[in-house]
Image (tube, grey):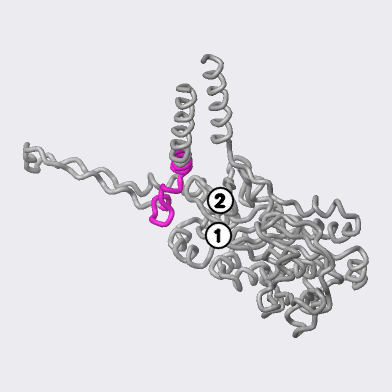
Amino acid sequence: MQLRSMTAVAMVVFSLGLLLSPHTTSAHNITHILAKYPQFSTFNHYLTETHLAAEINSRETITVCAVDNAGMEELLSKHLSIYTIKNVISLHVLLDYFGAKKLHQITNGTALAATMFQATGSAPGSTGFVNITDLKGGKVGFGPAENHGNLPATFVKSVEEIPYNISVIQISTMLPSASAEAPTPEPSQMNLTSLMSAHGCRVFAETLLKSPAEKTFDENADGGLTVFCPGDDAMKNFMPKFKNLTADGKQSLLEYHGVPVYQSMASLKSNNGVMNTLATDGAKKYDFVVQNDGDTVTLKTKIVTAKITGTLIDEQPIAIFTINKVLMPKELFKASAAADTPAPAPAPDADSPEPSKKKKKHKAPAAADTPADSPADGPSDDFADSTADDNSAFSYSAGPVVAGVLSMWFFFLLL
């Protein structure tokens, strides 16, 4: 009986450890997959060089159409820039799962697959799609949609498949695409404010153009720059507060939205923590905290929490991401509450009639209307609240698990 009870306890402890331990998922790694196949070493090298490998690893459902070293030599002989090579290779990354079986069982014999090139927004029209067609004799053809049905590449073999996560297949040759091979300017040569204006951040861009902060952004472009650009709606709602800042405060707030190093989306997801900004100056920290929950990345200040909603560009040495709120540093907004607090009522005049001795109920004064307490940026975004939410979520999910384990324990004790 004693031995049976000890065995039951051991099983319960083991089960409890498994159930309460953090859930982990074994994400795929395209670099490690291709490293096992020397014939794809050049293709694998450029996946890393162009940062496409990190983007592929961050996706949950994807197909990589790899070409061998000979096929890559044909591409490299065109002496394209690294940024153009990235566009070409991104055309070979399909945003869906196509294993060998699915390729030979395509509905209606043909499919149009979106690619990572299409997802960048750099592909005009339908040029970022790939036509996949089941051909006579058991072959499967591949061709850019812009080629009007011409299928220059064919399926060679499946390299590795993890259904339905990632499929790595070999195709016979690189997919020719005039759009993907078009000259691509280096990010540091781009007009940053024009790029922002064209993609939903016009108000922030125009505000930046009127500030000395624009020069700060430009000076950091070559060495590495990450910009978190508030969308137009968020910036418009914030403008009354912005106009109340001093000239130095306005410059600091704009520079607070820039980081003097290149941070890709993949690195933001993996390197959470405190991040300094262009506005950081000694004791004036002007920093914020980067946190992620799966694919969602948030930027937390003591005043507000903003979420990254999109990517305008993510090319070494520049990344520009859109966010849903204006970042508000505590250095600019923490002292405003005292300034806006209503002054105490003046003391009654000596000649004025005595107030009634009857006690009256007084309503509590309304909270001061400060930038920190505005409806859009309320205290719900504070660190303490976020921590409380995280803890309560854990308690809720862990409760049924613990109850189930305890039930198992009593069951074995009765045996």
Label annotation for residue 299: 2
Q: Is residue 39 above or below residue 102?
A: above
User: At numbered mark 2, what does the secondary structure look like: helix, strand or loop?
Assistant: strand
Front position in the image: 219 or 294: 294
Tell me the residue that label 1 is attached to. 323
Judge from the rendering whether residue 4 lies leftward or rightward of residue 406; answer left or right: right
Q: Residue at x 45, y 30 (%)?
A: 407
Distance of mark 1 from mark 2, alpha carbons?
9 Å
Q: Give the image location of residue 338, x and y in percent.
A: 38, 44
Numbered marks: total: 2
Disc on the earlier residue, 1 or 2:
2
* Residue 376 counted in the magenta span: yes
Q: Residue at x 59, y 43 (%)?
A: 285
Q: Is residue 379 above or below residue 218?
A: above
What range is drawn magenta here? 371-392
**Quadrant of the image occupied by residue 133:** bottom right
Amino acid marked by disc 2: Leu
